[in-house]
Amino acid sequence: MAAPGRPAALLLLLRLGLAAAFPNGRVTESCGDMVPRHGHPPSPDPKHSVAVARTTFSPGDQIEVAVSGPEFKGFLLEARDAEDPGGAPVGSFTLIDKEVSQLLACGGKEGSAVSHTSAHKKTAVRALWDAPRSAPNHVQFLATVVEKYKSYWVRIPSPVISQPKAPPLSTPAATPAPSPASPAASVLSEPFSAAGCGSSKFCVRSPAACDPAAERACLFLSFTPDGRSVTVELSGPSQGYLSFALSHDRWMGDDDAYLCIHDNQAVSIRPAHLTGRSHPVLDSWDTLEGVAWRLQDDGMQCSFRRDIALPGVKSRFDLNTSYYIFLATGAAEDGKIYRHSQQPLITYEKHDVTGDPQDVGASQAQPLLRAHGALMLVGWMTTVSVGVIVARFFKPVLSRPLFGEAAWFQVHRALMLLTSVLTCIAFVLPFLYRRGWSSHAGYHPYLGCVVLVLAVLQLLLAVLRPALNDPRRQLFNWTHWGLGTVARIVAVAAMFLGTDLPALALPGPWKTYTMLGFVAWHVGTEVLLEVHSYRLSRKVEILDDTRIQIMQPFTMAEAEEGHGFKKAVLAVYVCGNVTFLVIFLSAVSRL
């Protein structure tokens, strides 16, 4: 949430773990202690082994090293000084099979470690270790092997290899694999309550004014200052995980995050920090006190206490400063979390949770994105549709002059000009919000660019429209119709994709059905008017924009009846379009 151009939308928390959260094997954060950041202790009694091709070496030699055993997903292999196994990696590696293994830079040295390239199961991996000129007398290889998210073994040793004539190995101090110890957690006896929100504690609630004690669907976060510490309560409708983050801006990156993860009929509460758009890094429990949790039918609740200021902890923010607050929920399995499927809730502005108590709301869609969607819906669901139908079917009905031109033409021109203006304004808004191009919106932005180009071309083409009797007028008419038709088709496709984007966060599948209803409504109206026009064309031929030729005589009553029918269809059509528009705009405004 710190660097421009990186959306929150997608993305408060991603899947965690060495093999599960880092399936590409980029696990340099574990280079030092070789411990996966899974939030679970390593398993005892390794099932796997680390073998070496020979037990003696000289500087410049290549030694084959193999990690093997039952099927595993991920691994990390390093060489260490056998007399100082906690020290920096020694030497470098050369890959044997680049499909299953890759080189890492541990300790700032390229190729000093080997890891997996994917989470595909494997039973053995091999690599060549290149002995450096300054190699120590004795070298030992250490491997961390991940079988699954909660099942892994750390620093599995190989036999020691030694240089010729090296003095006997002095036994190094034991270096057991560090095991994250969780604080004692209690079970909450009662659900949280919204009592005191805005008076004695700072609250973020969605829906607004909901109460977690009475409403299971209430997503609730509260901060209650108590001297030098703050008690945090988090509640929501999730069977996977709940999370919140404090951010200096609305973008992912350099954020202080906290997770409550459903794991085996209990809840694991973990602090974490986010760096850029990478996976969250789980931190030590040391900063949390008074940890408690509660599971309920359709959700969970968790609470903890932490100091307002933690000067010695780099990744924890001081709570007496203003931040944007993010709230997210998602799926979890076996203690492992997955990317949330919906846009996280974000407060509208920064807040100091230790200042004056407030009761604030949050939105899944930011104002600029809501404005973008609203303007595009107005333009391409209403104004352009009405403008096209008026020009296509209402020339005889609205043929009277209006400000020097036929009324149908003035209506058509005004609506099309309005559509182009709305499109240009709406096109700019996502760029202002994203501060650049979004690579996570699928085909929607590309289709939007096509729509903008076609809308501008239509304006330029209209300015260059040939005179009525110009021989190029027929070419203009077909080109104008063709570009307009393509623009409408692409715009409808863009609206279908746009309403499904997490950044807009329109609820439920109804949005797709409503869009299908709008398309059917428009096509049905055009078919009805085409049938009516076909019947009329047997009696009247439209010569050009201002002249018609009577083919068969018909009474004034028939003419008035035809005009009245078209006017009624137009009125009903406009009302229907406005209804569809209001449905979407009301949903957007509630986000």
Image (spheres, rainbow, N blue to C red):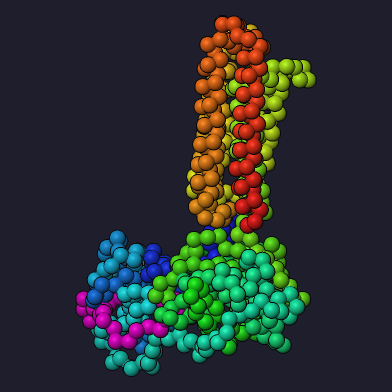
Closer to us: 84 or 271 = 271
Q: Quadrant of residue 1?
A: bottom right
Q: Is residue 12 left or right of residue 382?
A: left
Whether residue 168 is visible here, answered yes or no, is: yes
Closer to us: 322 or 526 = 526
Q: Quadrant of the C terminus?
A: bottom right
Residue that appears at 64% across and 83% down = 231
Q: What's drawn in magenta, residue-wise?
A: 36-60
**What is the residue that sits farthest to the left in this orientation?**
53
Image coords of residue 364 (percent x, y): 60, 59
* Magenta-colored segment: predominant secondary structure: loop
Q: Is residue 46 magenta?
A: yes
Closer to us: 47 or 422 = 422
Image coords of residue 498 (percent x, y): 54, 47
Q: Is residue 213 left or right of residue 330?
A: right
Residue that appears at 61% across and 80% down = 192
Q: Is residue 504 left or right of residue 356?
A: left
Closer to us: 551 or 429 = 551
